[in-house]
Amino acid sequence: MKISILLITLFFITTFGFGQQKIGLVLSGGGASAMAHLGVIKALEENGVPIDYITGTSAGALIGALYACGYSPEEIEGFILSNEFLIMANGKIPEKNLFLFRDIDRNASVINFSISKDSVIRKSIPLNLITPTFLDFEMLTKMGQVSASNGKDFDRLFVPFRCVASDVVHKESVTFSKGNLNEAVRASMTYPLYLNPIRINDTLYFDGGLYNNFPSDVMYNAFEVDYIIGSNVSENAEVPDERDMFGVLMSMTTTPTSFNLPCKNGFIINPGSNIATFEFENIDQAINEGYQTAMEKMDSILPYIERRVIQDELMNSRKEFRSKLIPIEVSEVNTILKDKSQFSFVNRSMIRSSKNEILNNKVFEKRYFRLVSAPEISYVFPTLSLKNDSTYKVDLKVDKSNEFKIDVGGHFSSRPVNTGYLGLTYQNAGYLATALHAESYFGKFYGSVKTDLKIDFPFAFPVSAKAYFTMNRWDYFQSFATFFEDVQPSFLVQNEMYGGASIRLPVTNNSYSNFDFRYFSLEDDYYQTDAFTNQDTSDFTRFSGYSVSWDFLFNTLNRKQFANEGTNLHFKMRFIDGGESTIPGSTSILIDTVNKEHHWFNFEADLQRYFLKNKFMNLGIHLKSVFSTQSLFANYTASLLSFPYFDVVPDMNTFFLPEYRSPQFIGTGLNCVFTIKKKIDLRIDSYWYQPIKKLSKSQNGVLQNATFFKESNFLMSSSLIYNTLVGPIRLTANFFPKQKDPFAFQISYGYVIFNEKAIR
């Protein structure tokens, strides 16, 4: 009888799978080298090895969570080899998600830091080197939806999953089995000084590898598996050099990990990856190493695996699992703040709850990146919760930016055009987002003071309004001198003062439309001859009036200046009306003061586009044209100073080059950027300039317009640029062929960026 019962029991076990062997997969941390885990998973699937449970740490948690969510190895590989993943790993944001509408005005800053009115500087030092905005969003869409659709229970995922993070306050490892999957994995990946830590239920979490970099014990205790397969690409750190501060700190904060299995039944695969922690450009190599190593060890694993998984059946199971996921449709947004201050700007930027608005995934993504672009917000972390009506609620953990932001920079050159920059901004967000900004440029060549007040309205179609006031001063020398030469006295001094208001509207994420109205007063002191002394008086021209303009800007350039990727397209239309008063000096051919009224239209188009890119060279084109109906001023120089300028090379703004000024012109150029090493470029720019209508003067000083399309010109610029984290360092040679000294050489640091001119 007992034998019969035993036989029947064995029959049911073998037939219906009762008591079948349970296989667990453990994935270590290891940064970019942990991508080798994907190669291991590919090899296991190809050999029919079942993966019933997964535990992971840090980057291993990322790979494990993606697999647990029902993504196939091919889908995961396509993702981590994509350009989007590289952008994510480097802490950048894709072009399509950059929200130019809230992009701050370009200035010469190279360093910025922020402080709060009630904090100390040590609290303002960031704990991350990259911005995880895109990373956090990608993890929300790829993991948050899956966990929310399955009750935030990690046992209900396609593969039951556990990940570990580190509670640095209590100095212990913490295992996540429930909650927001994207949040748990993000906590596990918080590598010190690379990603900022996140807070879950008032506990601050760091990288799981600090205390448990190979969670085999978690696998054994949580799932009681029969056989464990480990994939390990990490090891305990060696004793650091006493001069290695980062190594010493890591040694102080980490606990050595046991890279052994807690049971006899198992095998550890050790892919020999030479990929550095943050070397995400070569993760295809890591995947291949993981695959090859696993295939070589398969003879040691397969004899212990009692059952096999058919790939077609596995694929069908994945499809069935993912078909049950609830599509992302957001009907509610909840803002979670450290402080309890009014901050409705966030909710009003995301959703119109009063109108019962429901956002599909595409609209939600657009508004999310629009929100995080606001300078008043320092950090946003999103999670999803499924509501009873099968829509989602989004919880946004929001950190407000410190109220005060300080910018420091400038342009420092071997030529006498050195200019310092200092900016101060007070910013706050409540019902609206407001920013009060003041800045100053200071130096012999250029000085400026600017202040403005900007308000962002979080409407369904957002609007930004700004009121501003600016004073500029340029002091030009008749020389291309360096510090080692004496410069001639100033022959041209320009002073500008203007104020006005503008309204900015977004067109796309990468473009905006701007309407501007301003009053201005321009004052120019100049000599029209090289033969002047200290006893001579200069000519003086004042031009005052108003302008109304509209401009459209589309910009995806990858750098503030000296870009080598992307596109910049700018259209501008302006109407100008004002009165001129020119007082002749002692060297002028005029005798009496000239008063004239002027009004004209100005149309400008500027296109810069990099269209060819490879590992060693980027090639771009630059087109600029201006058409103006401007009338002539009292004399030749006064007219030149009011004309548009072909300033396609940044350094041209530090010279007075009359041959590139005209009321109507077209110009085109070729931009060749050779990559010498990472962050080191050799840049060669060459341009052809053709005035359509060029100003000239006769021997007796009478102004006249030259023949159409006459006297074309060209220019060249070559620079060796090191693009540091705090601005570019350049060795530059410029060639302007119609100058007395056509070559201008300089060594410089910083950005050649000045405040906008009033009308010219």
Image: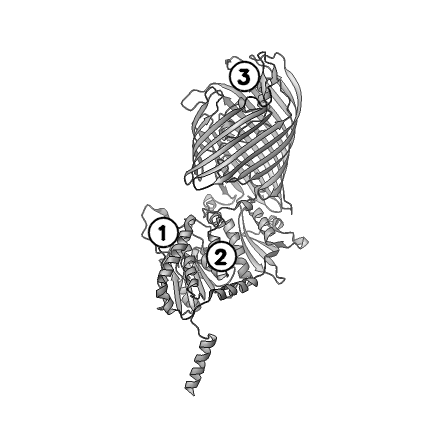
On residue 213, the disc is none
For the residue marked with disc 1, what is the amino acid? Asn
Residue at label 2?
75
Give the Cα distance between marks 2 and 3.
69 Å
Horizontal side, residue 709 vs residue 110: left or right: right
On residue 527, the disc is 3
Q: Position of residue 111 (x, y in %)?
A: 47, 38
Q: Quadrant of the C terminus?
A: top right
Q: Position of residue 585 (x, y in %)?
A: 57, 14
Give the Cα distance between marks 3 and 1.
66 Å
Q: Residues within 10 Å of mark 2 (few under 14, many from 20)?
A: few
> Which comes sooner in the sequence, label 2 or label 3?
2
* Residue drawn at 57 percent across, 59 percent down: 385
> Which comes sooner in the sequence, label 3 or label 1?
1
Q: Is residue 643 above or below residue 144?
A: above
Q: Quadrant of the N terminus?
A: bottom left
Q: Is residue 102 above or below residue 339?
A: above
Q: Nearer the viewer, mark 2 or mark 3?
A: 2
Q: Nearer the viewer, residue 713 or 350?
A: 713
* Residue drawn at 48 percent across, 38 percent down: 564
